[in-house]
Amino acid sequence: MEVLSVASELYPIIKTGGLADVAGALPYALAKNGAKMRTLLPAYNYEKSKFSNHEIIHTYKDLFGTKAQLISCNHNDLELILLDAPSLYNRVGGPYLDKNGKDYPDNWKRFAALSKAAADIAGGICTNYKPDIVHAHDWQAALAPVYMKHGNKRAKSTPSLITIHNIAFQGKFDAEVFTKLGLGKGDENFDNFEFYGDISFLKAGLIHSNFITTVSPQYAREILTEDFGMGLDGVIRENSHKLSGILNGIDIEVWNPKTDEALAKNYDIKNITHRKHNKSKIEEIFELDRNNGPILCVISRLTEQKGIDVLINLFGAIVDLGARLVILGSGDKEVEATVKDAANKYKGRIGVKIGYDEALSHLLQGGSDAILIPSRFEPCGLTQLYGLRYGCVPIVARNGGLADTIIDANDAAINAGVATGFQFAKVNEHEFYYALKRAIDLYKTPKDWHKIQSNGMKADVSWVKSGAAYFELYKCALAEK
Ligand code: ADP
C-alpha cells in the first residue's frame, strides 16, 4: 500500500506546531504496519545538501503561473516529494507568515498549488510513483481531494482522507479566489467552498474527501458542536458518517529521556531522581531562585487558544503557592509582551523565554515537575504526551485530546494507583487555580507524586495503536474503492 501524505510542515525539516510532529512520525508508524508513506511538502528554502537521492519526477511549465518541479528525495529515512516552486515557497519568514508575522497575501495560491500537485500525483503524473491513497493534512492540503475529484479517472478513483489537526485554521480567503483555483468551467459548486461570504479551503476538502479524521476521539465529538466547530460544525455534522478520531502518538525515539541529548542528565523510570540535574539547569537558564518547590512549565504557542491569558492572572497565586514557573513560547506579539511584562514582577520565581527552541523544550520536559496546558480547546495536544513520557506531570484543561490522555488525580484514581495528571473542567481562573493547588499540595508527598510520574512514564504514548488505526482506515478506503 502506497500512501501519499500531503503536509505543509514536517519534523525535522520544518515545524511550527504539532502537525509537523505528526506528519514526521506517521511514515514510521505506518511502515511498521506494512504501508509505505511518502510526503509531499513544499520546498521552503530548498537546500539540496539537506536531502539525498534527488530525482526530478515532474516539471511544471506553469503551476499557478510559475515554473515548478516535483523532486523525489530522502531526508534520513523519510521519503519525500518536494514541490519546488521558488516564487511560491522560497521566502524570508515562516511557512505561512512573513517576517513581520503577517499572512503571505498569496497563501491561497501557495497551498492550492500544493494540493493541485497532490492531485496530479494521484492522477499518475509521475511515471514511477502512483499512490493508492492520498492523506491530506489541514487546510493547506485540503484542496487535494477537491482537485482529485476534478482530475483524470485515476485521480477521481483514488481514495482520499483529510485529517483536521485544528479546526480553528480553515484556510479562509476572499470569495473572488474561487474563480482563480482552476476548477473547471463551472463544474465545482461554489456552495462547497462558501463560508459566511468568504471561502474556506477546509470546508471544500471536508466535503470532497472520502474520510475525515481528527486527532482525538473527544475532539471528533466536540467539533460536531457549535462550541467547538468554529462555524464548520454544520459541515462536520453533515459528513459525520465519514468522521473518526484517532489519537496522535509521539515519536518515542526522539522523545526519550534515556537518550535525549538536549538533557543535562538522562534518566528513566528507575532513576527518575536524575531529573534534578535538569531542574537545576532550568533554574540556571531562567535565573530562578533555588528552593524545594516545584517548577511548572509552559511550552506553547502564545495565543488565545492556549489560555495563556488565564494563566497570566494566576502568576501571583502560583508564586504564593510556593511554585516557580517557566514559560517558553512564541505567538501573538501582544500576548508575548503581556507575558513578559507580567513576569517581570516575579523575577526569580517566574522566567520567560520568547522564541521557538526545540532543545529547550526537551530540557523543560526533562526537568520541570509539571507542565501546564490550560487550552480553551486542544484537538490532541502533544506537550502533555511528552510530559507523560518525561515524568513532567500534566495539569490540563479537560477537553479534546487532553481529556482523552490524562487521568485526573482525584481520590479514586489515586487510590486505584492510576492517576497520570490533573484536569480542570472549565478554562477559568477559579478552576485552573484549584487544579494547580491540588498538584502543588500533592507534590509535598513525594511518594504520591512519584507514583503519578511513573504512571505517566509507563503510559503508551507511542504511535503503535494509532498507526494501526490509520492503517485500518486506509484498508477500509481501498476496500470501498
Ligand atoms: P499546537 O500544534 O496547537 O501548537 P501541540 O501541543 O499539538 O500544539 O504541539 C506543539 C508542538 O510545538 C510540540 O512539539 C511543542 O513541544 C512544540 N512547541 C510549541 N511551542 C514551542 C516553543 N516555543 N519552542 C519549542 N517547541 C515548541
Image (spheres, rainbow, N blue to C red):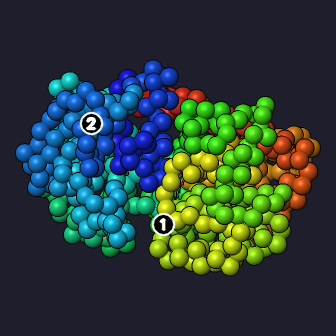
Q: Is residue 326 left or right of residue 205?
A: right
Residue 69: image quadrant is top left
Vertical side of 479 occupied by 23: above or below: below
Q: Is label 2 or label 1 in front?
A: 2
Q: CA distance from mark 2 to mark 1?
A: 30 Å
Q: Quadrant of the C terminus?
A: top left
Could you tell whether 298 is left or right of 210 in the image? right
**Residue 160 visible somewhere in the drawing:** no
The x, y position of residue 359, in whole percent, is 54, 48
Give the quadrant of the N terminus.
top left
Cβ of disc 1 within 8 Å of ligand 1?
A: no
* Residue 37 x/y as whole percent: 38, 30
Instruction: State the residue position of label 1.
Output: 331
Percent x, y for residue 155? 24, 36
Crowd class of label 1 (few under 14; some 14 to 19; many from 20; radius 10 Å): some
Q: Write down the residue under mark 2.
A: 49
Q: Quadrant of residue 160?
A: top left
Residue at the spot 50% in from the left edge and 29% down from the top edge: 29
Q: Give the residue displayed 50% in from the left and 54% down from the top.
A: 357
Residue at horizontal 48%, vertical 66%? Answer: 331
Where is residue 353 drawn, in percent x and y? 56, 64
Q: In terms of image quadrants, where is residue 177?
A: bottom left
Q: Amino acid at mark 2?
A: Ser
Please give the count of numbered marks on the rendered protein. Answer: 2
Mark 1 lies on a secondary structure that is strand
Q: Residue shown at 44%/38% (left/top)? A: 24
Residue 442 visible (yes or no): yes
